[in-house]
């Protein structure tokens, strides 16, 4: 069973904002001749790396709710320009909407068990064109 990571998406106003950020980073990577992965750098390295990389995702908390996830492809370490150890969470370029689940603010990241992870939203044919607020409201009502 996979283990996931939960992280606040600081600065994002919504899922569309996160998608824009991911798209920009992916396009920059492609232009540089690299894979279109995005990287999120943290201070602490997860000790349960193997469990996370066995199908785990990074779940994003946006505006007080778990709202989206990105598959975790790798976890690497490096030393930054100031000599401080950092951890890079290498993420797939796809941002997947999830059922909104309330979450209080916290610092850093947290492990998220597979059984506690919200399910992905399936919008059906053309549903991804629906405004983000409408998708969230329909999901809260259990209609998505």
Image (cartoon, rainbow, N blue to C red):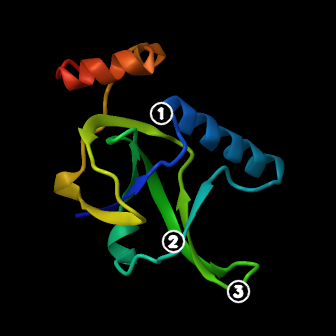
Q: Between 105 and 76, which is closer to the camera in this rendering? A: 105
Q: Residue at x 48, y 32 (%)?
A: 14
The secondary element bearing badge 3 is classed as loop
Q: Which of the numbered marks, if any, corresponds to residue 93?
A: none
Q: Say above or below: 39 vs 144.
A: below
Residue 33 appears in the figure: yes
Q: Are marks 2 and 1 in contact (CB under 8 Å)?
A: no
Q: Using a 10 Å C-alpha cutoff, classify the residue at mark 2 as few (fewer than 14 neighbours), some (14 to 19) or many (20 or more).
A: some
Q: Is residue 75 left or right of residue 55?
A: right
How far apart marks 3 and 1 lie (CA) works out to 33 Å
Residue 25 placed where, x, y %? Answer: 69, 47
Quarter placement of the C terminus: top left
Q: Say above or below: 76 vs 36.
A: below
Residue 74 placed where, x, y %? Answer: 51, 67
Q: Which of the numbered marks, if any, corresponds to residue 75?
A: 2
How far apart marks 2 and 1 lie (CA) works out to 23 Å
The secondary element bearing badge 1 is classed as helix
Q: Which residue is drawn at 22% across and 64% down?
A: 1
Residue on which the image places disc 3: 83
Residue on which the image places disc 1: 15
Residue 13 placed where, x, y %? Answer: 51, 34
Q: Which of marks 3 and 1 is nearer the N terminus?
A: 1
Q: Using a 10 Å C-alpha cutoff, classify the residue at mark 1 as few (fewer than 14 neighbours), some (14 to 19) or many (20 or more).
A: many
Residue 54 placed where, x, y %? Answer: 35, 66
Q: Earlier in the sequence, mark 2 or mark 1?
A: 1
How far apart marks 3 and 2 lie (CA) works out to 19 Å
């Amino acid at each position: 069973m996979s283990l996931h990571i939960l992280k606040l998406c600081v600065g994002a106003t919504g899922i569309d904002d996160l998608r824009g950020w991911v798209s920009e980073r992916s396009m920059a990577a492609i232009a540089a001749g690299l894979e279109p992965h995005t990287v999120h750098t943290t201070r602490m390295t997860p000790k349960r790396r193997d469990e996370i990389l066995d199908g785990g995702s990074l779940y994003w908390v946006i505006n007080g709710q778990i709202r989206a996830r990105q598959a975790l492809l790798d976890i690497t370490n490096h030393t930054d320009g100031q000599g401080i150890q950092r951890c890079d969470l290498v993420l797939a370029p796809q941002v997947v909407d999830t059922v909104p689940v309330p979450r209080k603010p916290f610092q850093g990241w947290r492990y998220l068990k597979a059984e506690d992870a919200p399910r992905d939203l399936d919008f059906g044919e053309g549903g991804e064109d629906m405004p983000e607020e409408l998708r969230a409201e329909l999901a809260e009502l259990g209609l998505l």
